[in-house]
Image: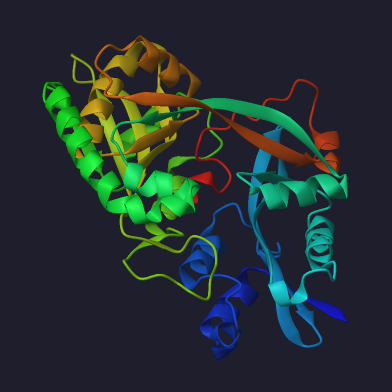
């Protein structure tokens, strides 16, 4: 028999601070992700953040949600993003995932969105018949360094014995790439790199439409879901640790010393994202020059960007240090109940970091 237990902010805080939290065979949430969820400025005190499923008294699975809201016709409309869904193999085939999802749908009156889902999760969501694909974002993944020793064995496990050869090939290729990129120097224009969004940036951001303000983003910068560490959390199966994981806030100034662009960058083990970018298209050239410098200086392997104006400008750049690129698409699944609440022609205007995308 399946029993469900829900946790709001206070209940989740009590749960992770108790001995019960670490007593299960697997963890339903990491301690630092729980603290971040609790501090989410858009999460209301009563909203459910986590649901646990017990089968015959034993933890069988869990589903997590990440509260958010829209401002529609001057009124706040609350919804949530699906952020985690897991069922232990021991309990597969007992419809626990469906039970968990239905409970979360009930908690939010169907006002649920999913994105960045695995193929297995996507198949389940489609099987339920309650979601629709809407508002897709097209993007690019740019590659800057050779990483065959990692990529090829992952795709073709039978080549693992050839990893030393791939490493030699990577070293040779990256030496040539370094020579090519030696012309990319530190920009001469003024820029600043901070570990948070400051007051000047916060005021500048008000010129642009955004689903998150400076205070909200700062909370997540200070309370990341992923911590820098070489250790791995074996009992929690979602993102928890990385050897390199950091956010940097970048400010770019024009020739008159006025702030012209600012952006949040997220670097994780050589892979770069741009969760938030605030700039007019005419001011993106300087940002691309800075980005090129940052990529080369930090030996970035890839950049994934759904920033349409930025990607267009990158295509026009003759100095951006990409060696290869691929088209990507981020798909969003909206619950049909949520769609009914949205006005005709509604555009969520999501940036790359909206939802829980900036967190991992």
In percent of width and height, residue 130 lies at 86, 45
Is 128 located above or below residue 87 in the figure? Answer: above
Is 74 located above or below residue 228 in the figure? Answer: above
Is 87 located above or below residue 310 in the figure? Answer: below
Let me know if residue 51 appears in the view: no
Residue drawn 16% across the image and 29% down it = 176
Residue drawn 46% across the image and 53% down it = 158
In percent of width and height, residue 14 lies at 58, 81
- Foreground of the two, 339 or 293: 293
State which quadrant residue 328 falls in: top right
In percent of width and height, residue 258 lies at 24, 20
In percent of width and height, residue 28 lies at 61, 72
State which quadrant residue 292 falls in: top left
Let me know if residue 25 appears in the view: yes
- Foreground of the two, 283 or 151: 151
- Foreground of the two, 112 or 196: 112
Check the picture and name the quadrant holding the N terminus. bottom right
């Amino acid at each position: 028999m399946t029993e469900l237990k829900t946790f709001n902010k206070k209940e989740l805080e009590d749960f992770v601070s108790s001995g019960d939290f670490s007593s299960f065979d697997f963890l339903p949430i990491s301690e630092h992700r729980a603290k971040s969820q609790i501090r989410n400025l858009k999460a209301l005190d009563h909203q459910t953040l986590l649901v646990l499923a017990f089968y015959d008294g034993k933890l069988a699975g869990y589903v997590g949600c990440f509260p958010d809201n829209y401002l529609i016709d001057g009124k706040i409309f609350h919804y949530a993003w699906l952020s985690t869904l897991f069922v232990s193999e021991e309990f597969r085939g007992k419809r626990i995932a469906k039970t968990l999802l239905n409970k979360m749908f009930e908690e939010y009156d169907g006002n649920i969105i999913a994105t960045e889902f695995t193929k297995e999760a996507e198949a389940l969501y489609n099987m339920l018949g309650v979601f629709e694909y809407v508002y897709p974002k097209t993007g690019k993944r740019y590659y800057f360094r050779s990483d065959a020793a990692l990529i090829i064995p992952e795709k073709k496990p039978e080549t693992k014995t050839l990893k030393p050869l791939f490493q030699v090939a990577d070293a040779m290729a990256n030496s040539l790439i370094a020579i090519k990129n030696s012309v990319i120097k530190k920009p001469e224009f003024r820029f600043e790199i901070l570990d948070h969004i400051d007051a000047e940036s916060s005021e500048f951001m008000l010129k642009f439409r955004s689903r998150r303000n400076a205070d909200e983003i700062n909370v997540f910068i200070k309370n990341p879901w992923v911590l820098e560490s070489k250790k791995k959390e074996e009992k929690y199966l979602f993102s928890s640790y990385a050897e390199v994981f950091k956010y940097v806030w970048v400010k770019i100034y024009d020739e008159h010393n006025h702030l012209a662009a600012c952006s949040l960058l997220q670097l994780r083990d050589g892979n770069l994202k741009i969760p938030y970018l605030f700039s007019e298209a005419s001011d993106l050239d300087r940002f691309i020059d800075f980005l090129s410098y940052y990529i080369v200086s930090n030996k970035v392997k890839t950049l994934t960007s759904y920033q349409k104006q930025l990607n267009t400008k990158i295509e026009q750049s003759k100095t951006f240090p990409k060696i290869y690129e691929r088209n990507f698409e981020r798909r969003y699944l909206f619950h049909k109940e949520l769609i009914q609440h949205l006005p005709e022609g509604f555009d969520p205007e999501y940036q790359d970091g909206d939802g829980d995308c900036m967190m991992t």
